[in-house]
Image (cartoon, helix red, strand yellow):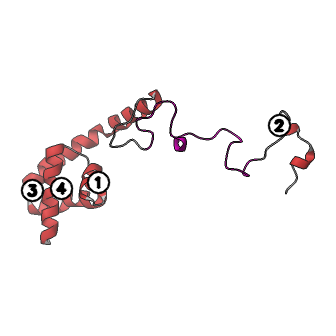
Amino acid sequence: MWEYMEKRVRAEARYILETGCTVRACAAHFGTSKSTVHKDVTERLQEEDAPLCARVRAVLEKNLSERHLRGGEATRRKYLGRPQPANGGGPCADAEPPRHESCVKPLRGQGQAGTARQFPRGQGMNAPARFFRGK
């Protein structure tokens, strides 16, 4: 294995053991893909240092067993209107009911200009036929 790979593999393994983070968080920290981190800590680390690999695998298995709980908690916070954690929130992470406009679906008929047919007030679908003809 190349020297830079060995250093990266050991650094990722140490980071996962120290923080107990997920593969996704480790990949974000090191600026690599999730698949690279996963291959590093499961296959490449096994070749270099089997005992270290076993300890890392234990952390990854713990994260895997808790994954459904984390997802459920995130959904619960979303629908109760509680702020999302700073690491996974998005533009509305700590917003209260007046939410960021990119997170709110427009009401019917309030799309972009010219995309929805506008009928005269109060007529709705009973508008004169000229509103139903193509432009």
* Dot in front, 4 or 1: 1
At numbered mark 2, what does the secondary structure look like: helix, strand or loop?
A: helix
In the rendered view, would you say 93 is above or below 45? Answer: above
State how far apart marks 2 and 3 are (Cα). 71 Å
Which of the two discs, 2 and 1, labels the residue nearer the N terminus? 1
Q: Amino acid at mark 1?
A: Ala
Q: Residue at x 27, y 49 (%)?
A: 25
At numbered mark 4, what does the secondary structure look like: helix, strand or loop?
A: helix
Q: Residue at x 88, y 37 (%)?
A: 126
**Could you say which is closer to the camera, residue 123 or residue 75?**
123
**Residue 118 included in the magenta stretch of the image:** no
Q: Amino acid at mark 4?
A: Glu
Q: Amino acid at mark 3?
A: Ala
* Dot in front, 4 or 3: 4
Which of the two discs, 4 and 1, labels the residue nearer the N terminus? 4
> Which of the numbered marks, if any, corresponds to residue 124?
2
Which of the two discs, 4 and 2, labels the residue nearer the N terminus? 4
Q: Are marks 1 and 3 in contact (CB under 8 Å)?
A: no
Magenta extent: 91-116
> Which of the numbered marks, if any, corresponds to residue 50?
3
| Horizontal arrangement in the rendering, residue 95 relative to residue 133 (left or right) | left
> Which of the numbered marks, if any, corresponds to residue 12?
4
Name the quadrant containing residue 82.
Answer: top left
Circle 1 residue: 28
State how far apart marks 1 and 3 are (Cα). 25 Å
In the rendered view, would you say 48 is above or below 70? Answer: below
* Dot in front, 2 or 3: 2
At numbered mark 1, what does the secondary structure look like: helix, strand or loop?
A: helix
